Amino acid sequence: MPPSESIKAVVFDVGGVLTSPLRETFEKISAGGVVDLAKVGPQFRDTFMVGHDGDLPSHRLERGEITIDEFVATLGEARDAVWTLMHPESPHSLFTHVTPHAGMHGLVDDARRAGYKTGIVSNIFTEYIPRWDQITNHVGRFDSVVYSCSVGVRKPNKAIFDIALAELALQAHEVLFIDDTIDMVAAARNYGFVAVEVADHATAIAEARSILAI
């Protein structure tokens, strides 16, 4: 059976999917001379986007086990740069500068109009929930919203996907999952989801629309 005939829901990541690309946002912050992205970027990527759910301070942060201040305190020489890039109180942070991606939000609304359920599965820490709620405008738009810090488990752990599936009352093969991190996409496919990687928003949106036939 083709994916468009078997899929009943679309589940979205937030940062880098429902938002503008995170690298572009970080580069804008870096362009202001506040942070040297070349120095802190690799650490950020290797810390948050690795393909497991373990005991790294960043993983504990995203599971809601420690606060952003406690996390930053673990970073040694990178502390100030990461605080600048991430802390909600920093005027130069991702929290302040990240914006919704209109094309991906259009996909959300078109999918709902076409009869698909919609959901969110996002690795995020407690202090960012208010901003994530603003960006997603999720009330009435999403049938399931699963934030890692609220449920105590993070992608790519299968348990966070199982929570979303239970809330959607669906099986993995009935869900299209969209994420910007290859490890998360690979994990979702391994669990039985149809998945699209957002390396480029326009390409990913076109691929998702083709799968959904919308």
Image: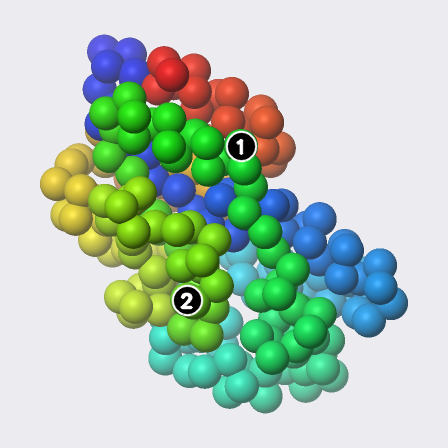
Residue nearest the viewer, comparing 190 with 12? 12
Residue at the disc numbered 2: 129
User: Can you tell which mark lies on residue 167?
Assistant: none
Left or right placement of residue 10 versus residue 67 in this view: left
Position of the C terminus, as image quadrant, is: top left
Q: Residue at x 17, y 35 (%)?
A: 171
Left or right placement of residue 107 versus residue 40 in this view: left
Q: Which secondary structure, mark 1?
A: helix
In this view, 163 is above or below 106 = below
Question: Which amino acid does the dot numbered 2 rest on?
Answer: Ile
**Residue 88, horizontal then vertical, whole percent:** 57, 75
**Residue 34, horizontal then vertical, whole percent:** 82, 71
Going from N to C along the chain, the mark reached first, 2 or 1, is 1
User: Can you tell which mark lies on residue 103?
Assistant: 1
In this view, 106 is above or below 167 = above
Q: Residue at x 59, y 88 (%)?
A: 73
Chosen colour scheme: rainbow
Q: Which secondary structure, mark 2?
A: helix
| Circle 1 residues within 10 Å: few <14, some 14–19, many ≥20 | some
Residue furthest to the top in view is 1
Specify the quadrant of the image occupied by residue 112. Answer: top left
Residue nearest the viewer, comparing 192 with 126? 126
Is residue 190 in sight in this rendering?
no
Question: Which amino acid does the dot numbered 1 rest on?
Answer: Gly
**Residue 200, horizontal then vertical, whole percent:** 62, 33
Q: Residue at x 62, y 65 (%)?
A: 96
Position of the N terminus, as image quadrant, is: top left
**Residue 38, horizontal then vertical, whole percent:** 81, 61
Q: Residue at x 37, y 32 (%)?
A: 109
Is residue 204 in sight in this rendering?
yes
Q: What is the spatial separation of the Cα atoms under label 2 and label 1, in whole angstroms? A: 22 Å
